[in-house]
């Protein structure tokens, strides 16, 4: 079931022109000059209920601008957005009741108050009935673990602890849609993991729709079943991750093998082999060969395999190719 529809979305910011040189800067104090910055240009996509979608693109691509429009914070310059049947920037309060917005750089917690006080405030703001509040607080505390610092003021928490508390605060009212704008920025590996596991669990238990922007592509690979890629305000790809990788020919796996003895030169169909004494690196396209077949070929030659590891292609490599090779804003052909 469709929950978000974005049609011909465009956003242009009006920014003051920066003039260089003393006279020009002085004149601009008296007579302001403006220029237009196109942040989003004809973006179209839909998102279904229960999807976890990665919204990715390089710095300045327009990700946060889109999230802010979907959350009802910004008006678009052109186009239409429907979230849960509501135009978010026209019915901001109605929209806010059904969404949660988590941004890695800003906190929703009251700095000097114990975090439980922020949770209680959320209960009043969202008019959450006591039994639902208690049930949700217990469940959220249990999954993400804020129990041990629930009475500590936000300013005394570490970044990871604050992030977890922030997440609990915005999830208490059972939002249908969660927008995560770089939720794991600055977190250590353990904290990142707990944030990812948390949203995975919430999605499974409550069928919550999640839209995630992150420069940490592991977040995207671990959580998302679909990605939307934007670049310089233009949509360049919308679809699943595997398809995106295959579009960029990034299907090369590497099998690193340690063999018992130094081997003679040999070849295996479809494999590019690098040898260094008893270490072998076999590169192959995963559509034309599989590790068991390759290992069998080695055994047939009497080569004794002591150890092996398989490195599969990752999203990061694909994204490097996309950001590096493509003309800005050029679509990825499906
Ligand atoms: N309030 C604003 N006023 C003027 N220009 C803005 C404003 N906010 C964003 N922009 C510009 O719009 C473009 C898109 O910005 P946006 O913050 O949406 O990018 P982003 O994809 O979230 O980038 P990042 O990965 O760095 O967070 C950028 O060129 C940015 O400079
Ligand atoms: Mg951003």
Image (cartoon, grey):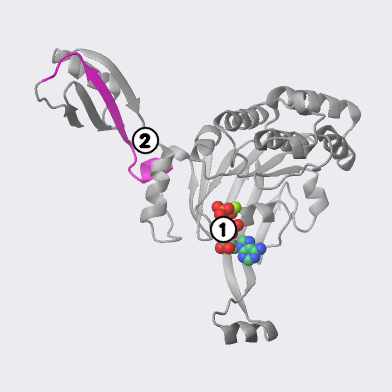
Q: Up-down: is 45 above or below 8? A: above
Picture quadrant of residue 72: bottom right
- Determine which residue is flagged by label 1: 43
Identify the residue shown where x is 62% and y is 43%: 211
Residue extending furthest toward the left: 264
Task: Identify which residue, 185 or 219, lies in the foreground.
Answer: 185
Residue 296 is a magenta residue: no
Q: CA distance from mark 2 to mark 1?
A: 29 Å
> Whole-percent x and y of residue 122?
84, 39
Identify the residue shown where x is 67% and y is 59%: 80
- Determine which residue is flagged by label 2: 313
Q: Is mark 2 within 8 Å of ligand 1?
A: no
> Whole-percent x and y of residue 222?
52, 32
**Label 2 CA crowd tier, 10 Å (few <14, some 14–19, many 20+):** some
- Answer with mark 2 or mark 1, whichever residue precedes in sequence: 1
The kind of secondary structure element at disc 2 is loop
Task: Judge from the rendering whether residue 215 lies leftward or rightward of residue 271; answer left or right.
Answer: right
Task: Judge from the rendering whether residue 194 lies leftward or rightward of residue 286; answer left or right.
Answer: right
Residue 31 seen in the figure = yes
Which residues, given as a range, are shown in magenta? 244-263
Q: Up-down: is 55 above or below 140? A: below
Task: Judge from the rendering whether residue 306 lies leftward or rightward of residue 12; answer left or right.
Answer: left
The kind of secondary structure element at disc 1 is strand
**Label 1 CA crowd tier, 10 Å (few <14, some 14–19, many 20+):** some
Q: Is mark 1 within 8 Å of ligand 1?
A: no
């Amino acid at each position: 079931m469709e929950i978000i529809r974005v049609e011909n979305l465009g956003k242009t910011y009006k920014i003051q022109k920066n003039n260089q040189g003393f006279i020009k800067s002085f004149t601009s104090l008296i007579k302001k000059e403006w220029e237009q910055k196109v942040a989003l240009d004809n973006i179209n996509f839909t998102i279904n209920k229960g999807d976890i979608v990665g919204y990715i693109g390089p710095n300045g691509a327009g990700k946060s601008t889109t999230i802010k429009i979907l959350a009802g914070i910004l008006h678009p310059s052109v186009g239409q957005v429907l979230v849960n049947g509501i135009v978010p920037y026209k019915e901001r309060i109605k929209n806010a009741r059904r969404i949660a917005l988590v941004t890695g750089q800003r906190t929703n917690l009251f700095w000097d108050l114990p975090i439980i006080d922020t949770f209680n405030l959320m209960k009043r703001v969202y008019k959450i009935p006591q039994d639902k509040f208690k049930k949700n607080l217990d469940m959220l505390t249990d999954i993400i673990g804020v129990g041990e610092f629930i009475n500590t003021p936000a300013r005394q928490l570490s970044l990871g602890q604050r992030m977890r508390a922030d997440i609990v605060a915005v999830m208490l009212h059972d939002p249908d849609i969660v927008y995560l704008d770089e939720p794991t920025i600055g977190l250590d590996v353990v904290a990142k993991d707990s944030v990812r596991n948390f949203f995975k669990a919430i999605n499974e238990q409550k069928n919550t729709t999640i839209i995630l922007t992150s420069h940490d592509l592991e977040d995207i690979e671990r959580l998302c079943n679909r990605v939307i890629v934007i670049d310089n305000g233009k949509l360049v790809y919308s679809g699943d991750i595997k398809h995106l990788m295959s579009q960029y020919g990034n299907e090369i796996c590497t099998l690193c093998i340690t063999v018992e003895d130094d081997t003679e030169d040999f070849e295996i169909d479809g494999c590019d082999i690098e040898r260094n004494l008893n270490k072998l690196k076999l590169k192959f396209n995963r559509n034309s060969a599989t590790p068991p077949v390759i290992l069998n070929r080695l055994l047939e030659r009497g080569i004794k395999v002591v150890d092996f590891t398989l490195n599969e292609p990752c999203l990061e490599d694909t994204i490097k190719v996309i950001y590096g090779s493509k003309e800005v804003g050029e679509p990825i052909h499906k």
